[in-house]
Every structure is written in structure tokens, then in C-alpha cells.
Image: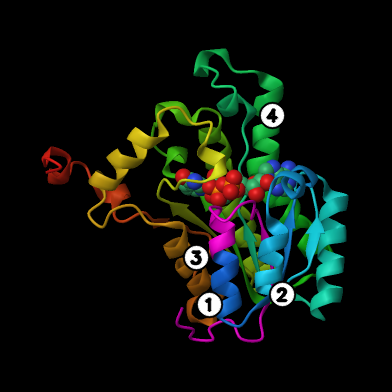
Amino acid sequence: MMSHNLLRGKKGIIFGALTNESIAWAVAEKAFSEGARFTLTNSPLGLRIGQINELAKLCNAEVITADVSVVEDLENLLNKSMEILGGKIDFILHAIGMSKNVLKKRDYDDLNYKDFIQTIDICALSLHKLLQTTSKLDALNEYASVVTLTYIGSQRIFPDYSDMSQAKAMLESIVRNFGYQYGIKKKVRVNAVSQSPTFTTAVKGVKSFKEFYEFADKMSPLGNATAQECGDYCITLFSDLTRKVTMQTLYHDGGFSSTGMSSNLFMKND
Ligand SMILES: NC(=O)c1ccc[n+]([C@@H]2O[C@H](COP(=O)([O-])OP(=O)(O)OC[C@H]3O[C@@H](n4cnc5c(N)ncnc54)[C@H](O)[C@@H]3O)[C@@H](O)[C@H]2O)c1
């Protein structure tokens, strides 16, 4: 893997690495190879069922448990990270997804509202909780970069995306609103990367994901973007080369979001 040392001297926190398929896993490996130092975090359940300790060894990183929906956990995570890394934070990856309604394959006209609220809390409100906590603790350096991951299901209809559609729409709105506030107060950047369908644990519950993945691959002139390519893109957003990019939903999707119809859809496989 070629390094450009784009993150040399930078300190970060990476949420959401569960398995080596996780998008956050790819981002962590790239950030490490670009010279960053960071802590890794996941929920107690994520630590139990995932392989984050393997990644921690590869990246020489410490793991700190935090449920992203619990403000006290976020305070502890930020304080410990600043202690371990020796100062304020320069970049954060928020790569969190979870919907019980999706996991239970409930129809959209038969959603469980307790689960709906939990989806919103974990997937969207958690970004606000994180930013409000970093702001109160003054935990971010000027021009720090916060990146969250989203999906175009926030803007268009994808039938099995369920309550995640509303969660991602709210997430993208928090990116704009908090990006504005944090930009004025502290010159902090906040952006969302809207990624192609990617095979990870989070999509295991989504009905017909394989067919859907293949459709998106054919629709996108450049094909679906992989987790590794998403890692590369996130590194540019953490780096000093994108200091004036903020409050954006940035499509990293091989061109899918601008394509109405692609001739690839009609091509035979042989
Ligand atoms: N996989 C895709 O097709 C795709 C496409 C676009 C965007 N995304 C987004 O990318 C992000 C990462 O997902 P992924 O696909 O890498 O899947 P993943 O399952 O590997 O990652 C999701 C992570 O969220 C963590 N998480 C869930 N609840 C949590 C909580 N309460 N506290 C802390 N962490 C919690 C999980 O432990 C896991 O590590 C998500 O925001 C997802 O919506 C994924």
C-alpha cells in the first residue's frame, strides 16, 4: 500500500470497525498507513461479537468501549483518547448503523416504533451527541474533520431500506446544521460520505441485498465503490487538502447518484 503521509502527526477516533469487512476497518488501515495515530471504539456488543482487537494490533491502537447513544460514554471516550494520544483530536470517523426493524425484516407499514426511535438514536442523533460532546469538552483542533457515512436511501426510495431512510435523512441534516455551528465557532469540518452498497455485517439483514448490489454496480458508470476505496476517500477528507469542504453529503458511488439509466443494465454477462 503506497503511503503519502497525508495524516502524519494527526490524532483521531474511529467508530464502527466490527469485522474486516467493515468500512471503518478499511478507513483505519488507510489512516494508519498515512501516518495517523488514533483510538478505536465500538459498543460493548460490538466488542463481544467483532474482531476489533485484531485491528487494534495492526494499527497499534487502543480500544475504548462506548455506546454511541450514551453521552457519558462519549465523554469518557473523548477524555481517554486525548490522554492516550496526547492532545486534541484532528479527525473522527462516525461509521455506525443499526436498525432492528431492518434486522427483523418488518414491512414499512408495520414498523415497531420503539425500534424506530432506537434506529434514529443510534444512527443519527448519535452524531449530534458526539459533536455536542466534543464541543463542550473543546476536544477538537481547528480544521478538525468529522466524517460520517450515509446512503442515498436518505433522498430516494429503496424499498427495503426502511426506517434507515429517515435516520440517514436526519443524519445528513445534522451534518449541515452542526457543520454550520462548528464552522463558525471553531473552523471544524463536518461531512457525510454517501457510499455505494458494500457487503458488511450491517447489510446482512437487508432483503435481496445481493440483487440490489448487482443492480447498483451496473447502474454506476465506474461500478460500485469498495470499502477500501471509501477508506481512500475518507483519508482525503481528514487531510489538510480539503480544509474548506464542509456541511456536504459527498457521493462516493461510482456515479450512481447522477445516472438515470445505464446501458450496462442491458448487457449480457457472457
Ligand atoms: N454497507 C453498505 O452498503 C453501506 C452503504 C452506505 C453507507 N453505509 C454506512 O456505513 C456505516 C458503517 O457500516 P458498515 O456497512 O461498515 O457495517 P458494520 O456492521 O461493519 O458497521 C456498523 C457498526 O456500527 C456499530 N454500532 C451499532 N450500534 C452501535 C452503538 N450503539 N454504539 C456504537 N457502535 C454501534 C456496530 O458495532 C458496527 O461496528 C453505517 O453508517 C452504514 O449505514 C453502509
Q: Which residue is mark 3?
A: 231
Q: Earlier in the sequence, mark 3 or mark 2?
A: 2
Residue 24 lies in the magenta stretch:
yes
Q: Which residue is mark 2?
A: 60
| Distance from the alpha carbon under mark 2 to that under mark 4 | 36 Å
Q: Position of residue 237 (x, y in %)?
A: 51, 70
Q: Amino acid at mark 1?
A: Arg
Q: Is residue 71 left or right of residue 194?
A: right
Span highlighted in magenta in the image:
1-26
Q: Which residue is mark 1?
A: 243
Q: Which residue is mark 4?
A: 117
Asked if labels 4 and 2 touch by Cβ distance under 8 angstroms, the answer is no
Q: Nearer the viewer, mark 1 or mark 3?
A: 3
- In the image, is residue 87 above or below residue 68? below
Asked if labels 1 and 4 touch by Cβ distance under 8 angstroms, the answer is no
**Mark 1, residues whose alpha carbon is within 10 Å: few (<14), some, or many (≥20)?**
some
| Distance from the alpha carbon under mark 4 to that under mark 1 | 34 Å
